[in-house]
Amino acid sequence: MRTLFADLQYAIRQLRRSPVFAITAVLTLTMAIGANVVVFGVMNAIVLHPLPVPDSRQVYSLTSGTTDTSFSYPDYENIRDGNKAFSDLAVARIALIGLASPGRDGIAQPVFGYEVSGNYFRMLGVRPELGTFFTPGEDTKVNGEPYAVLSYDQWRTQFGGDRNIVGKTVKINKYPFVVVGVAPRHFNGTERIIWPAVWVPVHDAPEIEGWNWLGERRNRNEWIVGRVRPGVTAAQTNADLANVGSQLARQHPGDDKDMRLRVSPAGMFADAIPARAFLTGIMLMAMLVLFAACANLGGLFTARMADRARELGIRVAIGASRVRLLRQLVTESVFLALIGGAAATVLAAVLLHLLSVWRPGASFNFPVEFLVDPDPMVYLFAVLLALFTGMLFGILPARQVWRTDPNHALKSGAAGDVVSRRISLRDLLLVVQLALCCLLVTSSLVALRGLVRTMGVPLGFQPDHVTFAMTDTNLAGYKDSAPVQQRLLDAVRRIPGVESVALANTTPLFQNRSTTSIYPPGATDFNTSSRKFEACLYSVGPGYFQTAGTRLLSGRDFTAHDDANAPSVAIVNEAFAKQLFGTVNAVGKTYPTAPGKFTQVIGIVEDGKYGTLTEDPTPAVFHSIVQEPNNSTTLLIRSLRPSSEMIPAVRRAIAGVDPALPIFSLVPWRDSLAFVTFPARAATVALGVLGALAMMLAITGIFGLASYTVSRRMRELGIRVALGAQNRHVLRAALGRSVLLLGIGSIAGLALGFAASRVLASMVYEATASDPLVILGVVATMAGIGLVSAAWPARRALSAEPAMLLREE
């Protein structure tokens, strides 16, 4: 320890003698380590960190087919009763709920909550902060005990942290519910990024939502989560579920549900959202930045060791072992790395806190939160990463130390004028750094091009100049939605500047989606084998397509006469018509929807995007909301007035119809699509930041090599100028090697970019490194990096004064 302390003191003295080197190294490490700590912090919180429940490794979500996580309540009952692997299975469904606390005059606050089975909390093994939880007895009767459990945050914000809240009555969709408990702090259920405000028994869903879907096997809107028995592995559980699924398929042959059941770790929609793959890809890119930083610092250390050759020779001559010298250098590098790691940890903690308070679902009131504040695991990762980094770039000059010849070092002096023509370790490190930089620049430009394509993809509607307002008549206690919806339309239509207004139950690319099974003409057997395809289902009112900006290609729009007394009609898109009828000329054709029931196609509209921006042409069918009323109410208001004027006007119009109608979302329609474009924007920002960091490292790397080369060759350059060398010859002699290494590194980086196209495509829509604009952008960026890096060394080389240099010699 005494020797280590002496090494540390000597390292501090050496760094004080080279402040520019020390500051450059610390800043480089802060950027590189900080990027890795931020990405790891997000991955740790969202993917790696267990759910906040006891023995969370035993809790799984159920999935059917490939990534389908939706089940019906009869599915849940059958799987619960037929399996042998689970000690308990529960069901949960997220739903929009109007929650009114005492003293708010019955005005409901729109929140998202979970409708859960009575054994939900027992299965998870959590204890309440206050009161108690539901029991399995709540599952014995439809619209039974009106109980509610508040989330900790909702209890603190809406109810002021009232510790006497247990036993009090709140209004949920204007029905009285008794608060029986408050969930513990930091508990948000079984999905990591969704933070519900309240939990209610699933058997109260008919009263809350206005219709009873509990007995409908084909109405799949719930997640199933369960705890496996102690000692039962995931493989054994999957084998048991395979038997249960096969039995259900035999018992219900007409069911269109894929019953190939399996388990996935609970927490991210059973991995239906590829968060793990996305964050892993970003983590790999961040590690590349770290390796580029290590190559940068390794090059600086190697050059520094060349300048310290005389010092090393003297120390060897007076008896220091080479192991002792190497330990001194590693101590110096690790000390630098720890300083950079500490700064990186502080920076990462600030960024992770900002990410935690960010609410990406605020524009459409969806309870998405990324609680990624660093925990001890993140800090441990930062320390280990700093130590690894310090060891990595500290041992790179080991070959120089091992080959130190004291006789040669003492004879040759501190530095020579001759620069070796051979490729040195420093050159190889710079090539590696430039290749990694070029790869990251390529990745960021590919992501940017993918984002541009994403934003420019035809949507099948025109969201600009349209205000999006969403409410739910059931939340205000309306049993018949049609009259109040008509009053809303009339009130909004009277707003000055409104060109058109339309009604729908939901819109394309919104989170609230429904599908329906489509059967071919002549079908008599309405089961899976006879189903033609699944189509996206929407209920819209007259004038919807004009307001939405969707082109009606043929046929007619809905009218007020397409009501419950009229024949069943539908408007379909081109993909629907081609897949069902083999032609887009389908106006007037009919298709069966149930035994003895048929629907006539009255119009064809253009294809669009309904679920994701990357989907292939998908069939979609639009029903008349006048013919099939729906309490989910979305108003689309087209106007050239700015949104800053329209949003308050629409809010006043809705309040004028009924102040108790909760406004779920009131934003420009373009803003409501933010959740859909979030993956592409997140990938672009992340890769852009990493690319910018890599560019900064490349600039410092080339600048360091060029400056070092010019410094070592100033006398030679002065002689060349004295002998009549022109400026281009001087620049070629001074910077030729740097330019050559830049070219080699750029070519290698582009090749790596082509090889990584598949990985990039998994993160960004239609990402490819073969895009001509991407290639031109990479070439221009790397050329710009070279020009910026070499500008000052080139100016210094051209300013060489032969007389002064020779006089100094």
Image: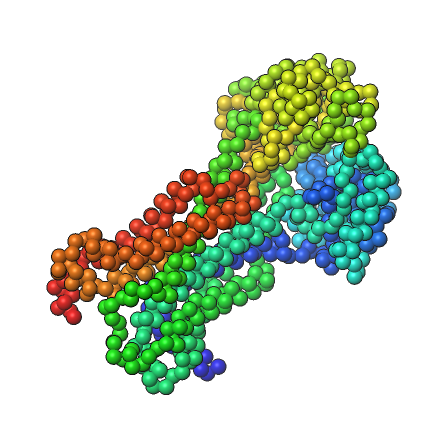
The residue at the far front in this view is: 422
Left or right of 43? Residue 200 is right
Q: Is residue 116 above or below residue 571?
A: below
Q: Quadrant of the C terminus?
A: bottom left
Q: Residue 204: where, in percent of width, then height? A: 80, 38
- Residue 136's x, y, as percent? 84, 48
| Quadrant in which residue 222 is drawn | top right
Q: Quadrant of residue 567?
A: top right
Give residue 541's position: percent from left, percent from top. 66, 20
Seen in the image, is 221 located left or right of residue 551?
Answer: right
Q: Residue drawn 69% across and 47% down?
A: 270
Residue occupying image coordinates x 71% and y 50%? 264
- Work out whether 330 lies above or below 626: below
Q: Please tell me which residue lies in front, 413 or 483.
A: 413
Residue 108 is left or right of residue 37, and the answer is: right
Rendering coords of residue 488 (x, y %): 65, 22
Residue 538, image quadrant? top right
- Asked if residue 667 shows in the view, the reply is yes
Above or below: residue 183 compared with residue 407: above
User: Relative to 251, is 660 above or below?
Assistant: above
Which residue corresponds to the image point at 42% horizontal and 62% vertical from the top-left? Answer: 295
Relative depth, front residue between 673 and 478: 673
Q: Residue furthest bottom?
A: 319
Q: Nearer the viewer, residue 36 or 353?
A: 36
Tell me, what colour scheme is on the image? rainbow
- Identify the residue at image location x=66%, y=53%: 186
